[in-house]
Image: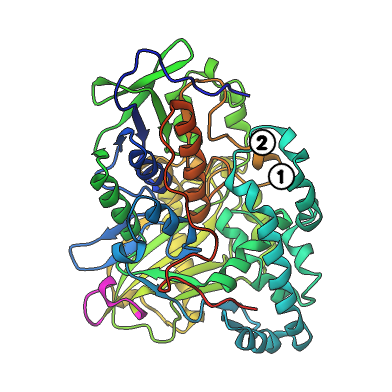
Amino acid sequence: MNAPLAAPAFRTGRPRIIIVGAGPGGLAAAIILAAQGAQVTIIEKDSVVGGRTRTLATPEGYRFDLGPTFFLYPRVISEIFESVGARLEEEVRLMRVDPLYRLVFEGAGRIDASAEPERMEAEIARLCPADAAGFRPFLAENRAKLAAFRPALEKPFDSVLRFLHPEMVRALPLLRPHSTVDRDLARHFRHPLVRLAFSFQTKYLGMSPFRCPSLFTILSFLEYEHGIWHIEGGCGAISEAMARVAERLGVELRLGTTVERIAFEGRRARGVEAGGRRHPAEAVIVNADFAHAMPGLVPEALRPRWNDRKIAGARYSCSTFMLYLGIEGDCPTLAHHTVMLSRGYARNIRQLETGILPDEPSLYLHNPSLLDRSMAPPGHSALYLLVPVPNLRDARRQGGLDWEEEAPRFRRLVLDRLAQLGLGDIEPRIRYERMVTPQDWRDRYAVGHGATFNLSHDLGQMLCFRPQNRFAGAEGVYLVGGGTHPGSGLPVIYEGARITARLLAQDLGLRPGATPQPLGGLSPALQATPSA
């Protein structure tokens, strides 16, 4: 385990901290540390903040989320804002989405998911009447599971000895670590499509419900317990709000500047080299994609747990094929969020895991103009289409995918599949189009192997087996982001930022920040009605 960083004896005044990358975790850490008296600089290679949580705005007036399209469990970011004297609902407008999403089971019906128990039970009964009785027990069990596991999500987990902590010992019977999401759900729901309705969310981690650890049944639980939210103007608005709060706290944002490497004296980080010069600092937080950035930023000798061979051999999530479409006219037959699950879903998953491009892919379609007219010009719609595909490394096992050659054919395939959602042929209505392939995720957005959801979340890459917030081997280097403990997904990344900031503040002797309010302390505007 890496020893805590002792505050350098030569330092006077406010400690200098550099954050590499202005993604959600970097912005959150900057807010917390600046409020505690640190002199914080964020250096970001792009000209905008947010990383994958940004909004793409076109000259034609369309707006698209680049990555995340909805906001889940706003408690954590709300607490971060309140701890520095800001209020989330004064910075952005959150809009509750109802129904949560529409699930279309190819050739087998649909469910309009609802956070209201009676409505959701009725929806489940459309597929399997006997399974409706399992919904409330599912909620109750996962409410207890989340409460039991929260300590592991809110604290460092840098040693296997943490498994012996009384908190973890008490939690293990609920977590059932050797079961999968699908098997765990079978205790509540008999019908495979009903189980799929509560397990497709493992795709948020880029994983299969048939392999993903059973802990992650909490993903769908969070949706039903705390709701799904749309941020007016797109999810990038939360990144922009965080940047505003950060700047009010004195954080310096340097956009359009690439960090080439972290500067070391021996094993200790002393700053970064960026934009042709050295920027000194007492500590460096890396908020860049772990697999892409760490081999270049930190010498291999200072990465004993994550040397080049370990990073290359790690297990990564799937990638995504994206279409951002500006459409003339409305799309009234669509929900705000629509998920179409292939009739051969299990086969689809096996293709992804073995590096084969699906021939009947599942897909996700976002239609934000239904709720938020700022996302498209009057009389138009902004559609976001996401299709899970193999990451570049897994695809190489099958000889690789040439996306320049493959993209036109695959685009036609997924547009044809949209017809099953009642859209018909939308080609004549397209007024704007942008495509992002796995190769673009790697080359344009610096995502290792194009693995959009980062390191896989299997048991061998969770908790103490995941890259740690205080990076082992290199003193004064800290991590935050989806590739770091506790994992990916916006609420979890924000929680990871709190862990990282807390460790760094302790190591540099910063004054403690304000104590976050306990669970349930959201403002009335953000408080969800419990689904009991």
Compared across the picture, whether 134 is left or right of 59 comes to right
Q: Magenta segment, which residues?
A: 370-379
Residue occupying image coordinates x 53% and y 41%: 483
Which residue is nearer to you in this view: 425 or 439?
439
Which residue is nearer to you in this view: 4 or 458?
4
Q: Which mark is residue 465?
A: 2
Q: Are marks 1 and 2 in contact (CB under 8 Å)?
A: yes
Residue occupying image coordinates x 38% and y 56%: 82
Q: Secondary structure at mark 2?
A: helix
- Give the distance between the C-alpha atoms of the residues marked 1 and 2, in whole angstroms: 8 Å
Q: Which mark is residue 459?
A: 1
Question: Label 2: few (<14), some or many (≥20) within 10 Å?
Answer: some
Compared across the picture, whether 351 is left or right of 183 comes to left
Residue 235 in view (yes/no): yes
Q: Where residue 479 appears, x then y in whole percent?
A: 48, 35
Compared across the picture, whether 57 is left or right of 451 comes to left
Question: Label 1: few (<14), some or many (≥20) within 10 Å?
Answer: some
